[in-house]
Amino acid sequence: MRLAVLLHGQPRHLEQGAWWFKNRVFPEHFKHIQVDYYCCFWHDGTPDLEQRVQDAYNPVQMSFHHYDEHINKFIEDVQYENKHCGEKQLLPQQIKTNVLLDVDKHHMSSFARNFWGQFLSCDLMTKMVGDLSGKYEVVCRTRSDIAFNPMGEEHWMRAFHNMYKNNIFDDKLLSDWLYVKSGNAYVGDFAFWGKPATWYNYTKDFYNNCVKLATVDKLMWYGCHLEYEMPFPHKTWMYLSQYSYTDWLSFAVVWPTPYASTLIRQPLDMSQETYQSLATKFAQHG
C-alpha cells in the first residue's frame, strides 16, 4: 500500500514529528506500507530550514513560501471584492473580522491574519504535487507537529483496504473526528485521509474557493448567529467542501481502530515519550 503524507503549514517541531512518524507510526519494519513524505511549509526565517526538512523527512518534493506575500495578496483580493458590499453587515462581528478580514490590515489581529494560513498552504501543496492518483493509494494531509497513536500495521492495512472495497468512499475524506453541534458540522483538522483523486478534487482550486467563501458566498456564515460557541475554523473545511461536492466521515467511527492524534507542543526526546504522555502534555498546554 503506497501512502503519501502531505505535511504543510508552519514547520513546527520538525525533528520530533519526523522521528515519531518513522519510529512509531510507520516504522521501517512494516512490510506492506510504503510511505513517502511531501513538505510545503511557510518559511520561518531560519537559515537552515531546507536542510532540516531534508534531513528529517527526505521528502520526494518540498517547497517553502513567504507567508506575508501570500496572505497580503489574499487580504487584498478579499477586501477588494467586499469593498462596496453591504451584505457583510448581516454577519457576526467575529466572522467579519476574522473571515472577511473587514479591518484595516495594519490593525488586524494576529488571529485574523493567520486564520486563512492553513488553507492557503493546502492550495500551495496541491499546486506542488498535483493529482497523486496512480502513484499512491492513500494520501494523508497533516502537519509537522502531529503525533498519531501508534497502531499495528494490520489496523492501517484494514482501514486502507476498506477505502477501496466500496465506491461510496470515492467522494469522501476522513477526518480525526466529525461532530454535529445543533445542526452544524465540524471536523477535527489535525489530519485528513482519502484517495488521491478525492483530495485533489477538494483542493485543486482552493485559493479561489477561499476567496469566494469570504466574498461572493459570505452569507454561508449567516448561521453563525445561532451558535453560542463558534468554532468557525473547524467549520471552514465544511463550507469549502461545497465547491467540490466532497463528503466527510470520521476515520475512527467508520473503521473502529485505536486511531487517535495529538500535537507535539515541546521540544522533547521523543524516544522517551508515549502517545498518552504526548496527549497529556497537549491537553495541559491548552
Image (cartoon, rainbow, N blue to C red):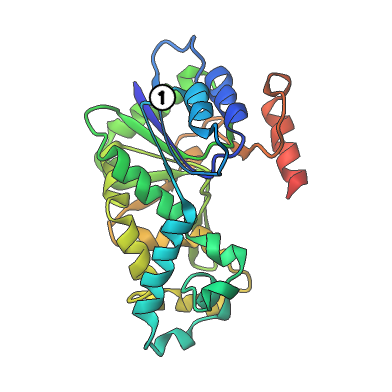
* x, y percent for residue 105: 52, 73
User: Quadrant of residue 227 in the image?
Assistant: bottom right
Along the viewing direction, whichever of 28 and 123 lies nearer the viewer: 123
Quadrant including the N terminus: top left
Q: Which residue is drawn at the image coordinates 50% and 44% (left, top)?
A: 43
Along the viewing direction, whichever of 9 and 104 lies nearer the viewer: 104
* x, y percent for residue 107: 59, 75
Q: How many numbered tags mark residues here?
A: 1
* x, y percent for residue 270: 68, 23
Along the viewing direction, whichever of 38 and 140 lies nearer the viewer: 38
Along the viewing direction, whichever of 187 and 51 lies nearer the viewer: 51
Mark 1 closeness class: few <14, some 14–19, many ≥20 residues within 10 Å: few
Q: Is residue 242 visible?
A: no
Q: Which residue is drawn at the image coordinates 29% and 28% (left, top)?
A: 136
Q: Residue at label 1?
A: 158
Q: Amino acid at mark 1?
A: Arg
Left or right: where 263 falls relative to 236: right
Left or right: where 45 falls relative to 194: right
